[in-house]
Amino acid sequence: MTLLLIISTVSENEGIYQAIKTKFIEGNPYFMGIISLVLVIGLAFCLERIIYLTLAQINTKKFLSQTEELLKKRNLDVAKQIAQNTRGPVASICYQALSRIDEEVDVIDKSITAYGSVQTGLLEKNLSWITLFIAAAPSLGFLGTVLGMIESFDQIQQFGDINPTIVAGGMKFALITTVGGLIVALILQFFYNYILTRVEKIVGQMEDASITILDLIIQYKRQ
């Protein structure tokens, strides 16, 4: 029974694969290949961002709590060393602030703000490329639609007859490329929104950490 179920599943998957392959060819393999390339490159940028953001995120509450305890004990060097050895923008901002602890509070605040902007830029790196591919995918699909329509009209002109059989190939090419471009754009849009959510979360952690570390430094100076 299990073997029959596996064979049935494999047959269904082969049927789906064959259907996709057929539509890919009907939509012009060269043009659909370009749309597929847009998907592959776009997903590569998305994957790179997801990995980067995953590595950039830490347990902010635990890190700041540890930093607070060290500053209360006036173990500044240890706090700086931990911040320097911890990955992510939150730890980097804290290290920049602790490195300037002997300066005025206003100077430290400006330094935190400036460095926070740099870290935000690093978090948002390559997002413009993803938006480019999101826009390019449906545009290529619509371009395929126009080319398919032109092909249909050329065939009508050549045969001098509006026959559904004659224009079907061009119309099918037009519709399949449009669908392909829209599907690619939807897939990339999903990942783009997910990445934006991750970026906003980390930026929020950076802002909270900036306020917290500045308060800790003020308390440290008053001791």
Image (cartoon, rainbow, N blue to C red):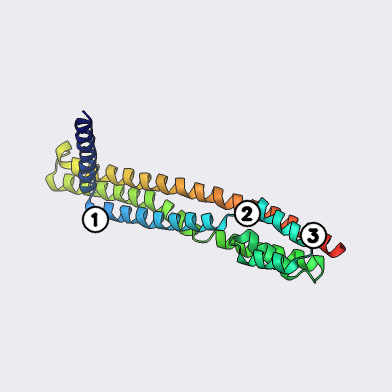
Q: Quadrant where the N terminus lies?
A: top left
The reply to whether residue 174 is in sight is yes
Question: Alpha carbon of mark 2 to alpha carbon of mark 1: how far?
Answer: 42 Å
The answer to which of 62 and 206 lies nearer the viewer is 62
Question: Alpha carbon of mark 2 to alpha carbon of mark 3: how far?
Answer: 27 Å
Task: Tell me which amino acid carries mark 2.
Answer: Val
Q: Earlier in the sequence, mark 2 or mark 1?
A: 1
Q: Position of residue 146 (x, y in %)?
A: 30, 49
The image quarter containing residue 165 is top left
Q: Is residue 77 left or right of residue 87?
A: right
Q: Is residue 186 left or right of residue 5?
A: right
The reply to whether residue 114 is in sight is no
Q: Secondary structure at mark 3?
A: helix
Task: Look at mark 3 in the image and give the residue it sits on.
Answer: 72
| Number of the label disc, if any, that sits on residue 30 | 1
- Choose mark 2 or mark 1, whichever is in front: 2
- Residue beneath the point at 37% across and 45% down: 182
- Residue beneath the point at 77% across and 61% down: 71
Q: Position of residue 38 (x, y in %)?
A: 36, 55
For mark 1, does the 10 Å Cα neighbourhood hold few (<14), some (14 to 19), or many (20 or more) residues?
Answer: few
The answer to which of 11 and 170 lies nearer the viewer is 11
The image quarter containing residue 168 is top left
